[in-house]
Amino acid sequence: MPRVFFIGDIVGRPGRTVVREVLPGFRQAEKVDVVVANAENAAGGSGLTGRLARELRGWGVDAITLGDHVWDQKSFAAEIPGLDWVCRPANLHPDCPGRDHLVIEKDGFRLGVFTVLGRNFLPPRDCPFQVARAKLDRLAEECDAILMEVHAEATSEKVALGWFADGQAALVVGTHTHIPTADCTLLEKGTGYCTDAGMTGPYRSVIGREAEPIIERFIDGMPRRFEVAQKDVRLSGVLVDIETSTGQATDLRLVHLRENEWQQYRNDDRSGNNGS
């Protein structure tokens, strides 16, 4: 029975550091077969680069998903076609570069992975429900199980997409709001669901950025630079077990490890982590 670990939004160097130091040991201890991570905030808190995508892969991430910050790094549109373990959201315009889904194979197990962007409180995109239906139907023919990420602001939209995919996806997991939710559950037809996997990054912050400038911005409305925070770094995600004969989840749980908890998995090799 394959076990898949989905890592919630990796934010900046703190998020990358905890992945590098903890994921190899966590993967071994928890007997994880496939790791999927949202890395749309991995480069300085906004976007991704090819170099960082390759680093994450080297630390044990099998597949990388992205969200509304997909194009924040100016070089990435030219880099993404060469990154065959990275997919951009499926409901962007079809002419956008990059893959709109992935099929990850491990020991004969084929996991389909795709992301849809929500439309409530985010810029208009193609309908996530229509795009999800097409992807679920297609990947059902190619894969043993499907992981569907919903990168959205509104919890109602995420929950609706969870019920929409019930019985077809093994896991529907939400991202974007950076706050882990306590609602991991198995839906009626066997789909594992969680509204938000949380953020892998600094929690002494406002969703990953230093708190004080954001508080001041809320008070007076004046523009400020929002730096990635550094303290209280946690690893957050969802661990799901999948029955390959049905493509459905049999168990899932939220993983939310504070520093005193993730130390037990820690790898002390700190090489190769440069940048913000």
Image (cartoon, rainbow, N blue to C red):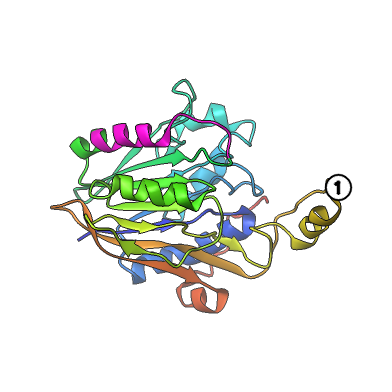
Which residue is at 44% across, 46% downward? Answer: 150
Left or right: 259, with 196 as reference point: right
Residue 200 visible in the picture: yes
Q: Would you say the magenta stretch is mainly helix, strand or loop? A: helix
In percent of the image, x 68 and y 51: which residue is there? 276
* Residue type, label 1: Met
Query: Would residue 126 be counted in the magenta stretch?
Result: yes
Q: Position of residue 217 (x, y in %)?
A: 81, 53
Q: Is residue 122 above or below residue 29?
A: above
Up/down of 172 relative to 86, above or below: below
Please provide the residue range marked out in magenta.
122-137
Q: Position of residue 257 (x, y in %)?
A: 50, 72
Residue at 30% x, 31% y is 134
Q: Nearer the viewer, residue 31 or 152?
A: 152
Q: Is 24 above or below relative to 35?
A: below
The mark tally for this picture is 1
Give whichever of 233, 155 is nearer the camera. 155
| Left or right of residue 102, residue 38 in this image | right
- Dot 1 lies on which element? loop
Q: Is residue 254 above or below residue 99?
A: below
Residue 255 on image: x %, y %: 43, 68
**What residue would you read off at disc 1?**
222
| Residue 57 can be seen in this image | no
The answer to whether residue 228 is left or right of residue 222 is left
